[in-house]
Image: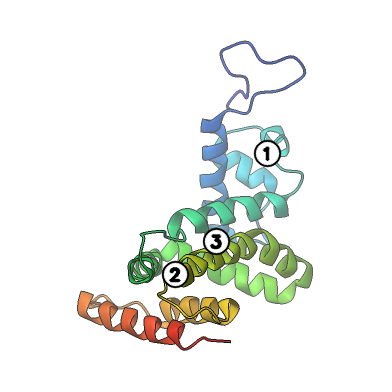
Amino acid sequence: MTDETEPRRAPAGAALLRSDVTEAIGAAVLDELEASGYARMSMEAVARRAGVGKAALYRRWPSKQSMVEQIVADFAWDAVPVPDTGTLRGDVGQFVADAVELRRDLRAVRIIADLSAEAARNPELAASFLDSVRGPRRRAGTAMLARAVARGELPGSLDAALALDCLVALAYARPYSETEEDAVNARLIDAVMAALGACAA
């Protein structure tokens, strides 16, 4: 088991949370989600896989749900960040490229499928995940579209919510294929650009 104490003097009244321990826990959570699924995953199993005491988890999160929400939100952000390339086409192209890479990640696909199924059975979990995982991404996506409007690349009357729905749906709806080519993705980017331009309120 890994000790939580850093090899230096800690501030009075505060326990330092080691970043390497946090990273180990995050990796263990994703591995447990893939292996067992959210419903069967336990804090004990995560602690064992991470090589830490269970107390290390509760120092960071009050519950399994809050732990999974943060780790999945961070994972989603790292896997498919909301880009800021300076042009709308560049942003759309990067988003599509990241989505393609995510579809190639079988662990990510399994985790997303499991959490989606669990959320369908658990309205409280679904609402919480929408707030913690989807909410920040929607806000960042709205800001990305606002930059495009300011540059004159999208109409000022853009329905941002509809445009985001189109971007995400078109980027992820296409099944992953081993023969996926740049030319196919370029056509997809063209389709997304046309859809975004049509999303005027």
Quarter holding the N terminus? top right
Task: Measure the alpha-carbon separation of dots 1 and 2.
Answer: 41 Å
> Residue visible at 48% across and 81% down?
155
Q: Is residue 65 above or below residue 134?
A: above
Task: Measure the alpha-carbon separation of dots 2 and 3.
Answer: 13 Å
> Residue visible at 51% across and 46% down?
27
Q: Is residue 20 above or below residue 25?
A: above
- Dot 2: what SS? helix
Is 58 displayed left or right of 176 in the figure?
right
Q: Amino acid at mark 2?
A: Ala
Q: Amino acid at mark 1?
A: Leu
Q: Which residue is mark 1?
A: 57
Task: Measure the alpha-carbon separation of dots 3 and 1.
Answer: 29 Å
Q: Which residue is mark 2?
A: 148
Residue 162 position within the rendered picture, expressed as x and y whole percent measured from the top left: 57, 82
Instruction: Name the quadrant containing residue 121.
Output: bottom right
- Dot 1: what SS? helix
- Dot 3: what SS? helix
Residue 159 position within the rendered picture, expressed as x and y whole percent measured from the top left: 58, 81
Q: Of circles 2 and 3, which is in front?
A: 2
Instruction: Name the quadrant containing residue 182.
Output: bottom left
Circle 3 Cα neighbour tier, 10 Å, few/some/many (<14 / 14–19 / ≥20): some
Label 1 vs 2, first from the N-terminus: 1
**Dots 3 and 1: beta carbons under 8 Å?**
no
> Residue visible at 45% across and 58% down?
81
Circle 2 Cα neighbour tier, 10 Å, few/some/many (<14 / 14–19 / ≥20): many
Label 2 vs 3, first from the N-terminus: 3
Mark identifier at residue 11? none
Mark identifier at residue 140? 3
Circle 1 Cα neighbour tier, 10 Å, few/some/many (<14 / 14–19 / ≥20): many
Q: Residue furthest top?
A: 9
Q: Nearer the viewer, residue 131 or 37?
A: 131
